[in-house]
Image (spheres, rainbow, N blue to C red):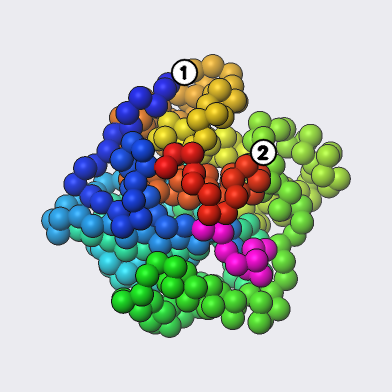
Amino acid sequence: MYKISRPGIDRSIASASGATRDGQPLSYNRAPSGDLAPWVARCYVTIVDAPANHHLSCGLFNDTACLRIQLRGKWTAQTADGVEQMEQAALYFGPHSRRMPISVTGSFISVGASLRPGAAHALGGAATSEHVDRLTPIEALGLFSERWLRLFDPAADAESWIQAMEHELRRQFVRRGAAEPDPFVGKLEAAAFVDPTISVKRFADEAGIEQRRLERLVKRDFGLTPKQVLRRARALDMASHLRGVADREEAESLALRYYDQSHLIRDFGALFGMSPRQFVERSQPLLTLGLETRQSCRLEMLERLAPGDIRPWQ
């Protein structure tokens, strides 16, 4: 099994929020305020300084839909609809079925919120299945780009930006009386964090839901089938380990989720477009930032890490 000896790192960029012990940049991220927790999984701010002509070619692979407010940087993404280019923009990213190639030139700033499965449906947006591997202006959720781009005072710090974003999200979810996501959807979300090797049939039996109904709910709110959701979760946990942003005490249990090395290689080829060895050796700061945010959320949801605690990779 592949080990994390020294993940590839781009030394020409630096994050305002520090770095892992290996030197990989980190974002400022935390759990949302309690009243937003039914709809929001994580809030983050990423501020990365780079030379003006520095071109970073990387990718994103997120298991949740996200609001991303790009405040700086020249971005290019290869989506299901083709190549998208943007600079300052307020965007709704659907969840990913596989790694989305994405690049950015120069320094960049991104403020965002990872939405829990079912949150977009609660806002009255289209089924998540229609947004998988896509990005659109946030008007797709009934929000207004111009308003969101004005939320963030350039002189304020990252926490103030998150509080401003939470205030706006509260207007949309809480004050509009948005329904909370279906509880069975939340149960699958938790299962994907706890043990993504569980079979769909066993999950449905233990959750007390007819499998066909589960398939419909999950397709609507996750955008994928239950089997795809669990497979993706297993790969993202292993990817976090390989990039050094997971609890190393879990290393053996994460590896044992794969039958053998060929199983791991096949999954990484299908989902990340590269072998596990390539995944370790390449510099992948954008993807690693997303993995670190997800692992922070996961460990807190599993109550293995208290909010505000130093994370195992710091």
Q: Residue at x 44, y 49 (%)?
A: 290
Magenta span of residues: 30-38
Residue 98 horizontal/vertical position (percent): 47, 43
Q: Label 1, on which residue?
A: 1
Q: Is mark 2 on a helix, strand or loop?
A: helix
260, 139: nearer the viewer: 260
Residue 76 horizontal/vertical position (percent): 29, 57
**Crowding near the residue tagged with mark 2, few <14, some 14–19, many ≥20 C-alpha atoms within 10 Å:** some
In the displayed structure, does residue 306 sit left or right of residue 51?
Answer: right
Residue 308 horizontal/vertical position (percent): 53, 54
Find out whether the residues at labels 1 and 2 contact each other: C-beta distance under 8 Å. Answer: no
Q: Label 2, on which residue?
A: 194
Instruction: Answer above or below: position of 4 versus 291.
Output: above
Does residue 260 belong to the magenta stretch? Answer: no
In the displayed structure, does residue 230 sit left or right of residue 79?
Answer: right
Residue 247 visible to an observer of this rendering:
yes
Q: CA gap, disc 1 to disc 2?
A: 22 Å
106, 121: nearer the viewer: 106
Numbered tag placed on residue 310 in the rendering: none
Residue 131 visible to an observer of this rendering:
no
